[in-house]
Image (cartoon, coloured by chain):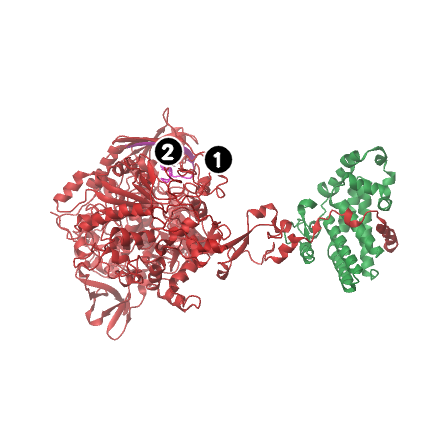
Chain colours: A green, B red
Amino acid sequence: MEQTQARSNIYALLSRVLMQELDDEMLEMILKDAAIREFFPSLKDWEILENSDNKTLLEQHINVDFANISLLHLVPYETFYTREDQKIETGGANPVTDIYNEYDYIVDYAKARVVSSDHIGIELEFMHYLIEMELRAAEANDEDAVKHMQFAQKTFLNKHLLKWAPMYLINVKYESRTPIYYDAAEMCLEFILADNEYLSNGKAA
Amino acid sequence: MFLENRRTFLKGAAFTVAGAAIAKNVMSTDVMAESLNESKFTNTPDSLAFYPPLDQWEDFKELSGDDWKRGGIERKGVQSDENPDGIYVNDFTIVPTACSNCEASCGLTAWIDKKTFTVKKYMGNPLHPGSRGRNCAKGYAAQSQMYDPDRLAFPIMRAPGSKRGEGKWVRVTWDDAMTAIGKKMGDSLRKGDELSKKSVMFHVGRPNENGFTGKVWQTLGQDCFNSHTNICSSGGRTPTIQWANDDRTSPDWANAKLVFLNSSHAADAGHYFQQAAGHIADARKKGAKLVVMDPRLSNSAGIADLWIAPWPGTEATIYLYLVQRMLAEGQVNTAFVKKWFNWEVMMDNSKYLDFMVEKGYIAAKPTGNTFEDYMEMLKELYTPFTLEYAVKESHVPAYKLEQLYDMFLWAGESISSYFWRAAAAGNRGGWVSGRTGYLALGLRGAIGPKGGTFFHHWHVISVAGKGGSATIGQGSRGKDVPKISSWNELSWPPEWPLSTYEMSFLLPHLLTDTEWQQKWIKKGLNVPTKLDVWIPRMYNPVWINPDGFRWLEVLKDESKMGLTFNLSPTWSETNWFVDYVLPVGLAGERHDQHSEATMPARWTSFRQPVMRVALEKAGWKPNNPNRATLEAHIKAGLGEVWEENEFWFDMCVNYIDPKSDIFLDAAKTKTIKSMWESKRTPGKPVTIAEWYDAAFGDNLPNLHKTATEDPKYKDSEFPVYEYMRDHGAWLEENHIYSPQERVIKEDAENYIAHGHKYKKEHVEIDKRTGVMTAKAHGDAWKYPDGRKPIGIETDGVKMEGMATLDKKLDFFSEWFASDEWKWPEYAIPFYPRNEKEKAEMTHIVSHVNHMYMKEENSYALNTVFRLPYNIHTRSANSKHLMEISQNHDPIWISVEDAKRQGFKRGDAIRVEIVDTVSGLSSGYFVAMAVPTEGVLPGTLACSHHGGRWKLVNSVTIPNGVTDGKVDRSGIEKNMNDPKFMAESPKDVGQDGAQIKIENYNGTAGLNSYGVPTAEMQMDGKEGKLTYTQGIVPFKTERFAEQNKDSDNIWWDGLSGSWQNAVAPAHPDPISGMHCWHQKVILTKAEAGDKIGDISVNYENNFNTYKAWRDELTRPLNETNKWRRPQWIKRPWVPLTEKAYAVRIK
């Protein structure tokens, strides 16, 4: 259970960081929560962090870098990496939509501020939901449901995130100009690979 | 490594805040997602078809295209009680109808939102064989026309004490109007003398139905059915009558190899263009070539394989050049010509052959009378039409004519063409282009086969007037309705006996011209000098006809037009000057059976009042079954808007002849009332379902069989009507090729031709021509020797043949050459061969031929082309069409001409119209110059469909909303609400039952989307009009939802000049066509001139009409026994021998 909760939390954290620019509350959480901060090891050597208030950090550095790695120079959408023509599929033909629909999930685009449901932040958040469902199934001692949810996680991870996210995340590591996104990319890359091994080796059960 | 790392990741469990609180939570499983899953909607439909299957039409849900813009269902889900923010779902019932915005009758479907009982959109009808689910901009515009805030909401009458045109109106009930009109009509008809049969004139612009109103006028005993045809297409019909005794061309565009357009018509605008363009596109996809012959680079010409720009009216020289080469080079389909040209008749007419020698057409009479002699004679006859002559006369470069010839040969017999409007309607003698064009087609065998060109009557269904079995008096298919026994000189003057249709555009001239009236009265004709009642319908002659000020003079004169009323859904220039305007419905608000020859098949559409049909199919019952459409339109919030079918049923039974004492026959057995009384409910008018069940069922056997065998309909009270109500279209017969070759059936005793049996012993077969004739019964007077031609035998096969007397294609029109009909020089396809002949043969030389362009800066103005988004007079009530049609009617002038005269794009120029017969100036209009390479130098182009006007911006109808008016029910319009479905207004049309018009404050605009305001002056001789204000953005409460963008109007509505008022009437001496083109002289605008100004000398115009009449026609005289050739039908109503007979003193 602890492991499952950990996985859920990490997917939630990564989806939040990679979906939208940080706000003051989120930045405070990263800086103050020791467990979270451990996932951002480069922060300790970041001089700007020591000399700036949150507003400056966000407006002049972190969010600028977010625009850099998610809007200006890199494209955080699955179909950009998987389609021959490198176009983002914004309509219902997006391959992730069917899976979301299967679990009665729907993306609130206005809230997410993304153009398509295969944004890396959305896909990570979907993993978070699948794991949350597993947790609820476990609480109810519904082993079949637990297994089903684990299978769903593994399927989604393999059919979607692992097909393209590593390429994007490696690019983020190269393009990022702040430790926040460098570390987030590094962490995300390692995590999804590790998580796949975890799900594949039957450790989850 | 990663496994080791995973230990690190276990720290994720130690977050102080749970993941659920960290995530943005942009995914949810709320009702939005459920609404999507529970609905049928998806972003990835299996098909992109516009139309659901027929079995879903009565209940079809579709997401709102407007609301979709909020983000679509992936973002908002589908609207439901649980998810109110979802995308709106229209709850449609789909009702078929047919467009009425041009003549083509393309299928439409009205998508009626049940929840608001409004038409959200009009789409095509996929079941319509001709239009195949497609429409042009005009079709979709039916929706904006329906909810035009200025549409007339109730019957109105000229205010007592005011004069016509003064603009004072009061609201009246339908009953009051019908009582006054019915009494006036009844009083006139009751007299029963000959003049009374010429006193109540109906004047239709666009009929858009096949025989209903004609039947009404037949049952009124009137020779008073007038139409707009002679300002439209009589020049296109004349050659078809001569060749085939048919009405018009009917090409098989879809299978042609060469599509040869003699105008911008068909592919671009005008007759059947949306359907024709689709078929032409199909043909081109298969490799067909497109040739467009037009002095203007039309849209079609722009995409053609070959554009030929001849001088207007010289097209015949091009056809005859083709003919000359085919004959000279042995490229004639001799088998077809021998079989179907009337060569025997010609070669046996010694007198005519002598005449040809005398005229120098041929050097000597042929020595024999065989087919080979005939072909040799043709070769000689057309030798003068060389490439050099065709180039000189037409101004088309030689290389283009040679290309055309090559294409013509390449296509074999698969050449589709259309002779209509443009050349035929613009030029004096324009009909000769068709006469010679058919010759070129015929010599290649292209008349009748697949991909070729044929004739109209084989490809059309006319049953709208044949529902007689539903009435007490008409008999099956109307067989008991008496024929008309009088002849109206106001529509068929003796100067134009061969006019294909009525000389309608001369009506004001003939009513004004007392000298002309007295001349013919002295010669023994009973010429009317006035009309008791004049009823235009879907017609605006003041604006669209030539010499508009003359129309105004006559309309205002109550001594010439006793009572006038217009059946019209909208305001128009003409309406302003009549006594009553009675609002009848638009495309989705009326019943019509309407068929057109758009393909080699016989289809019909069924136009319907869609709101009524939707209600009735859902179980609603009207209070008054004879006014169901009126009740339904009130329920729909359209106002007291009715339809003509029910109006005329009711008028004839309850208002014109309420006592059933106006008799139609000498024996006094048939009354007007009995003609329209229901057989099922005697004393009451026939109903729509009764009439159309009979009209369709009694006349279309395949439809009858299908409907009565269909399990859905076979037990219905009116199975055929209901089948048509649900489908909106029907294909009775397809793939009709070369039907003249249909073999005559026979049994032991009879031949059976065209459905009639003829006893073999009564049939004779001419040994020389093969023509089969039978002794005629009752109509022997129609045939020169009293014998009716019923077929033709060729090579031992008895066939139905053409509709001519000799059952063949009349290369030689023998009757045309006769002393009786007086035009021998034009009895064969011909055109003058030199300048001398041109001077002699003025009847067939265009009045804008280059030989008349003697003054510097004189031009031939081509006026006859349509703008594909405009509908003559019927567009100004559509905001969509008005927005896309602005400033599109300038003067096209060639770059070189513009440069010579110093005109730049946008310059105002004066266009003075000068007549080449009378030599008189008509005045001028001021137009905008647009220099272009798209027009032949020396010619200009400016469509005559511009220049709408009104004299005031808005009109207030006193008591429009308050005194004595009844509130509507107060029940929300919602077809899903049983209360709404159970309710209907009571006593509609009666005093005390007038309804308050929703959101109408007593004042309405007049075509606020499309017609600017003008100031007019006229003094009996000269008239002027200048625009004072363009249209402006406005707000409306009426139909506010559909017009919420009316404050976004960016256009001023000034779209051309009212050039028709400047144009004098130019009646062609033979076809009777108003020849639209003009000789004009261009000068720079003078100080104070504004684009749109006109200045007219309509006294000169009157003298120009007289000059064309007196110098060019060959009127009936004492040698004539008949008003016109007896075997040539008069349109609309059948006439008796007495009516056709004439004696001129």
**Residue bounds of the magenta highlight:** B922-947
User: Is residue B158 at all visible to an observer of this figure?
Assistant: yes
Chain letter, disc 2 residue: B
* Coordinates of residue B318 in the picture (x, y in percent): 33, 47
* Residue that numbered label 2 is attached to: B952
Q: Is residue B940 inside the magenta stretch? A: yes
Tally the numbered discs.
2
Q: Nearer the viewer, residue A129 or B579?
A: B579
Q: 10 Å neighbourhood of mark 1: few (<14), some, or many (≥20)?
A: few
* Left/right of residue B362 with respect to residue B52 in the rendered view: left
Q: Earlier in the sequence, mark 1 or mark 2?
A: 2
Chain letter, disc 1 residue: B
Q: Nearer the viewer, mark 1 or mark 2?
A: 2
* Coordinates of residue B499 in the picture (x, y in percent): 24, 48
The outermost residue toward the top is B1087
Secondary structure at badge 2 equals loop
Rounded to the nearest whole Å, what is the CA distance between mark 1 and mark 2? 20 Å
| Amino acid type indicated by mark 2 | Val
Image mark for residue B1050: 1
| Amino acid type indicated by mark 1 | Trp
Q: Nearer the viewer, residue B147 or B81?
A: B81
Q: Nearer the viewer, residue B877 or B785?
A: B877
* Left/right of residue B695 with respect to residue B82 in the rendered view: left
* Coordinates of residue B1090 in the picture (x, y in percent): 38, 28
Name which quarter of the figure residue B601 lies in: bottom left
Secondary structure at badge 1 equals loop
